[in-house]
Each structure stands twice: as structure tokens, then as C-alpha cells.
Image: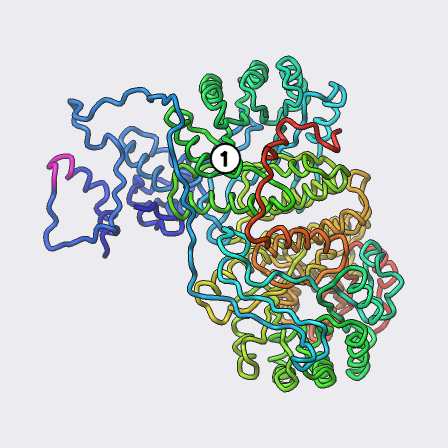
Amino acid sequence: MNGRDLIGALGPELLVLLRSAGRIELEGFSLELDELELRIPLGAFAPANGGLPSVAGPERPNELLPAEFVPERPTYPGRVREVALGATRREGGSRGRSLTIGGAEAPAFSLFDRPVVNMPVISMDVFDTRVPMPKALRAPFEEVRDDPAEWARLNVGRFGAKAVTVHLLSTDPLIRNASPREAAATVEAVLQAVDVPLIIGGCGDPRKDAAVFSEVAAMAAGERLLLNSVTLDMATAKTLETVAKAAAEHGHNLLAFTGLELNDAKELNRRIYEYLPPERIVMDLTTVALGYGLEYSFSIHERARYAALMGDTELQHPTISGSTNAWAAREAWMPMPPTYGGPELRGPLWEAETALSLLLAGVDIFMMSHPAAIGALRRMIDALCAWPLEEVPEGHANDWVTARLGGEA
Amino acid sequence: MAKRSITETSPIEVYRLLPRTNCAECGEPNCMAFATRLVNRELALEACPPLARAEYTEAAEALEALLAPPVRAVRIGEGECAVTVGGKYVVQRHEFTYHNPTACAIAVDDAAPPDALRQRVRTAADFSYNYIGRDLRVDAVAVRSTTGDRDRFRAAVETVMGECALPLLLCSPDPAVLRAGLEAAGSRRPLLHAADRTNWREMAALALEFGCPLAVSAPDDLAGLRSLVRTLRAWGVEDLVLDPGTFPGPGLARTLRNFARCRNAAIRADDDLLGYPLLGAPIAAFAGEELDPVRCAFDEAVTASALLSRYADILVLQGIEGWSLLPTLFWRFNLYTDPRKPVAVEAGLREFGSPDRNAPVLITANYALTYFTVESDIKAANLSCYLVVEDTGGLSVESAVAGRYFSAAGIAEAVAASGVAERVDHRVLVIPGLAARLSGEAAEATGWRVLVGPKDSSGLGPYLKERWPPGPA
């Protein structure tokens, strides 16, 4: 029993004792002072004759009382690993430049007490086949929807994408069941069309994805692709080993996908460690749309990052968010009354806010679609990563209180 | 000595201070159960009537101190419409849970013609969006003085009060202007915004005279903020709200840093002077160089989202159009759900319309949003059917499939437990399109024929029209 429990156990009795005896001695008992916290209501010991000075009315100072603020700068025993995406010629691939993600040493964008190690990255989506997609989402890409290489070129050329995700949905047995060879040809075309790092998305079928990823890994040897993704389902289907070995052999990274469950994430990482160095694993802990469970994603990412910083090596991996999932929310795309504007406004805002919440929870790389959402997140990342922090322009603070504003009703 | 955090307070400790009579007046079977719920903040001390008796005064005070949140709770407004802000126990949501959802205040100003003002207040006060069975609404109105004219301000406050009963924020750096506003709204306990290093004496006097909470403004100056709080407390002003400044665009880093510093200091470093609710002003997005109102509203919504995630207890907003307000109200609602409990509905069988023995049988997840969405689509399409609600741990179909909470075995179990087999003659189950991958295994596990339904339940009407009754397999 520690001191606190003891005092707690004695509780009211102790008060009675103290009041009657003035002091007590506890025999055979020693107490560390910092364990002890007595919360005794003021007045409990005040003798009836008023031994304490009477409390006067508050003394009203005429000048501001001085105060300081000394910011804390907490340090953490753990650090998130860095993962390199894409490989230049010198690094054994053909990319114009490679990217590094991860490396966090403190919770993201919280106390801003040190520069960001690696800026978060946005990768733009390309789909290799026509899948049902809200009109507002596909509108910017209407002309390239049948040509993944052109789509990738548009993403990089017009929208400034720093990375591209090729979703090989055509390989889905329930869609077109395209062969691994066809899928590899698509990836090859995209590799030739753009020189940014690539993320390669499968269809979610543990067997088919294994075959596709193996083929793509061999074709693009040395490119340091991020294969999206491997799952515990693959472990069950005994295809995880195939993919992990292909990634190891041909120099790629793996994205470990789990559904909002950190124990699963840790287990999957442990399985992958058997084949691949931890510096080549990124985690997808699942992104759910705003309004459809984003708070679960948010809290799981905050928990994962905190655990990583506190030293849980199995969670010390950069994380990714499929923020395009925001469009699964009906509020992003469905027709609504006029006050709700059109999906071309609501949709990008929905996607931007879904991504932003996870940016603040520590996510390192985002898979996104709508250029307006990407623009908003990019501005946010630039603002939050500036070091030293931007100064507040003199006289601009709290203008909102008295200013005539744009957009007044 | 640092105050211990909420997560370190044990039910035993609380129990020792309770009457320990197991009278059950609180509705709990015994004092220990009540103590546990107190520690979980599911019940408040007021739920224990005996504690109010004189013999327990000391224990009650000790309990209050033990259970007090490091960020004080401050009430704005009077009566049914009052809103309480702050009262936070933790920095991160997952450490415990957040209490007192961020109050969203819509700004109006005294330069607007009365009709326009009335219209704007009505629009804001009437805004409502039904989300998982609840109405999302704004919580307060912030009246700004842009004219600096006392009479205009008093008139504007009167107009607002005539239109709605929402709690008020009265905003002006000029104490004389605020006094004019208080002449109209003094009995409604508005939040006064704000005391700063030049006007604090007059603002403190106003707060004391009218018994109102007072916001303290020190833009990007936490030492100044602490100094003001310390001084105002010495004056006897206890109900304070902190405004460390909201700087949009490139200033957002500094904004978020100040919010995080305040909250971390209050909760993790026991800094009593910063242990007050935080006021954020996404409205500042309208006060910059950007003039396009749509772009301003977009930036405001993004700023609001960031401030909600970073501990804001009150937000002042300018945009009142649904498209910019909706994500803010959603995220506010979501962040304040209890992470210890998924937002779930009860699993089991639901009946819609007047289903006969050939009626379709559907299945879905028990995440509240999923359920209410499916329910409203079934009703909108006027379908007669059975809906099996599977316990997916409160996850949506998509997440539950990914996380394997919605599985073939789970489907089989839910169908069997629902007893739907006794209500229909057929053995055909429609599963959600998002669970298409499970169709084969689900057929095997249930022994039913499995049809893959639409990905979005809004497609159920047309889907069943076309596919039901199903032809021979």
C-alpha cells in the first residue's frame, strides 16, 4: 500500500483524528512525500475561535500583476522511422527525385518546438479503370479517365503532384479481372509518363493482389514503389510471404493496412519484419470519411503516434491516409438544398477536412484526388511547416472584432 | 505538486469520500458503482442527494476538488439555452473523453440594417441538420460592434434578442460600447469579449457588475494572457475565457501553437492561470486580404476544423451557409463522442412497412450512422422488408469489413440470432455492396442464398424493384 492509498483508506477517520488530537503518529510506517497529496478542505482545521486571519475582500490591484510563460519542450524516447519513396537513377531507379517521409520526434503540429523533419507529402490518385465516382470528383479528370499514363501526367504537370498513386482496380476479380501482366504494363506506362515516386494500389483481394504486386515488383525493380497494400488477410491466405519477398528482392516498400486496430497493426508489422527491414514499411491504419467515423481514424492515429514516440518500436512507422475516402460521405457528393452549395464546393472541403484532421494526428503521406482539396491541404502544410514560425503581422490580431468583413450578409 | 490527472483518480479514492450507505438514491446499486461512474464522468456529484447534507459538507468539498477538471467549465447564457464550455480533463481525446462540445457562435454586427440583421440571425438560429438522429445546430450569436456606436450596438443586441434565445457574445474592445449592450442583455449572462492590456479595469468592473463571464485577449502573448488572468482573478473575476488570438493563413502555425501550449500547460503542467476555455475565431479568415466570400468561407471552415482538433472550446464563425457550416458541426459532434463507446445502435431485427413472408431480408452494420442512413433510405423508398442489424462493434460496413468485424461468420450469427428465418419462407439475404467480397463465404456460413446489394443504401429502392423477388438461383 502506498501513502496515497493509506491516506485514502483512513480518509475521514484521519480528519477526525487530526481534529481531536492535533497530531497523529503512525508507527512503523514511512512515507515518501511526493506520493502524498492531502486535499483537506479549507477550514477543516480552523479552531472555533478563529485562529486563521480573516479573509479580507479581494484586493484589487491597480496595475497588471506580472506573469511569465515558459514553454515546455517535452522530449520523447522514441522516433518514427524514415522511409524513402521512389529512387533516382543514382539510387537504382528512374525517378527525377525521391521523397523521404516520417522521422517525427514529437507529436505533429502541436507545440511547434522544433522544425518538422520531413514535410508531409500528397500523392494524387490515378484509377486504371472507370469505377463509379461522384461527378464532382471526376470532373477535373474527365479527359484522361481512360489513360492512366495521361492521368498521371496531368496530376504532375498541371496539379503539381509530388507522387502518384496508381490504383489497379481493373485487376479486381469482381470488376475486370485484368491479369498481373496487364497491370504491370499499366505501371510501366505510368513510370515512363512521370518521374515522381509511385504508390501502387491493388484491388483488395489477398490472392490476386499478391500475384499483381509480385509481377509489378519484378517489372519495376529498384524503383522503391510503395505497394498498397498487404494485410492480415494475406497472412491468412498465405500470400503475405510472396509479396514481402518480392518487395525485399526488388527493392520496394510495403504499406501495411489494418482496420482501426493497433494490435492488428503491430501484428502485421511483426509478420513483415521477417522479410523486410522496418525502414521499408508504411502503415495504413484506415481513413474513414468525416461524418462516417473520422473520429475513430483520428484517435487511432493520435494513439499510434504517441505510442511510437513513447518507444513502441512496432508502431514507429510513417502513416498514410487515403483521404479520397472522404467522398464516401454522401454529404460530399449528393444533391442538397441550395444553402449547401454544390458538390463541387462541398466535396473538396470534405476531402480537405478529412485529410487535415489526420494531418494534425500525425499522418505523413496522403492519397488524395480533388485539386481544390489538395490545394487547401498543401497551403495548410506549407503554413504549418514554416520554420521559424511566421510572425503575426503587427496590428492584424483580433481585427475580426471590429472589422467590416467580406461576405457580410 | 502537480494535480493528478483524471485518468489517475481511482474509484476507491472517490468511494472513501462518499457516504457509503449504499442508499441507491443516485440510481446506482451502491456507492462503489456510483464512484466508478463519477470517475468516468458519466454522473455528477449532484446525483448523490445525501452529499448535500451538512454532515457531508467536507467530503463534498473534497470530492469536488478531487473531480474538478483542470480546465474550468464556464457557463454562457441563462436558462435552457445556456451553453457550458471548457470543463476539459485531458489534452487528447483518446486519453479519456472530451466534455462540453465546442460552442459555435455565429457573428453578426451592428452596422447591418435591422432587417438584414434579423434575417441573418434567423438563418443562423434556424439552421439544423439531422445527423444520426440528432439535430446539428449553432449554439450562440456573437454581436460585434463595427460602428463603435453605443446606441447602434444596444439596438443590434435588442434585435438579436428579439429573434432568438441563443446565448450571446458581446464583442468590442470599448467598455462603453459593451455597457450599452449589457443594458439590453445584462440579465442573459453574455460572454464579454474582451479584456486586454488597455481596457481590463473597465472590463473587470463590467463583468463583476453584471455577473458575466469575460474573455481575455492577448494575441500571441501567453505571458500577457497569464498576467491578465492573474490580475482579473485578484479582482474577483472567476469566469474567464482565453483568446490567445486566431491568425489565419500562414499565421495558423502560431495560432495552433498557442492553443496547444495553453491546453498542455493547464492539463499537464498544472498551470492554473491557463486552465480556462479557449476561444478561437475562424472568422478571422474574412478579415484578411482575401475578398472572395466563397474562398473566405472555405478557409474559415478549414481553420475551424483545425481549431476543433486543437482544443477550441468556443468558435466565432462568419459563414452561415450550409456547405461551410456542415463539416464544422459534423467534426464538432464527432470529436465529442465518447471514444470509449462506439456510436452504435442495438443489434437485432428491424421491421419496415408491412413485410409478408416473401419480404426481402437485408443486413447492415450497427454503426449509428450506417443504421440511420439505411433506415431513412428504406423509409424514403417506402419498402416493406426486414433488416438484420449486426453487431460490428459500432463500425460502419466498410471499416467493419476491413477490420473483419463484419465477416461471414458474423453475418451467419446475426441472421440466426435475429430469428428472421421464422418470419419469411425464402432463404435469400441481401448484403451491403461494400461487403461484396464476403458473398461467397457468407452463403456458405448462413446456408442462405446471398445477393450483393447496392454500395449505397440510396440505391435500395431501384435495386429491389429490379431484383426482388429473385429468380431461381
Residue B193 x %, y %: 55, 27
| Looking at the image, residue A375 lies above or below residue B301 | below
| A364 is higher (above) or lower (below) than A203 | above
Classify A401 as above or below B325: above
Q: Report if residue A181 is visible in the image.
A: yes
| Amino acid type at mark 1 | Leu
* Count of picture labels: 1
* Residue B370 visible in this rendered orientation of the protein: no
Q: Nearer the viewer, residue B356 or A246?
A: A246
Quadrant in the picture for residue A167: bottom right
**Magenta stretch containing residue B336, yes or no?**
no
- Magenta-span inclusion, residue A19: yes
Find the magenta span and give its range. Answer: A17-23
The residue labelled by disc 1 is B242
Query: A180 or A152, which lies in front?
Result: A152
- The chain identifier of the residue carrying mark 1 reads B
Whole-percent x, y for residue A228 in the image: 67, 73
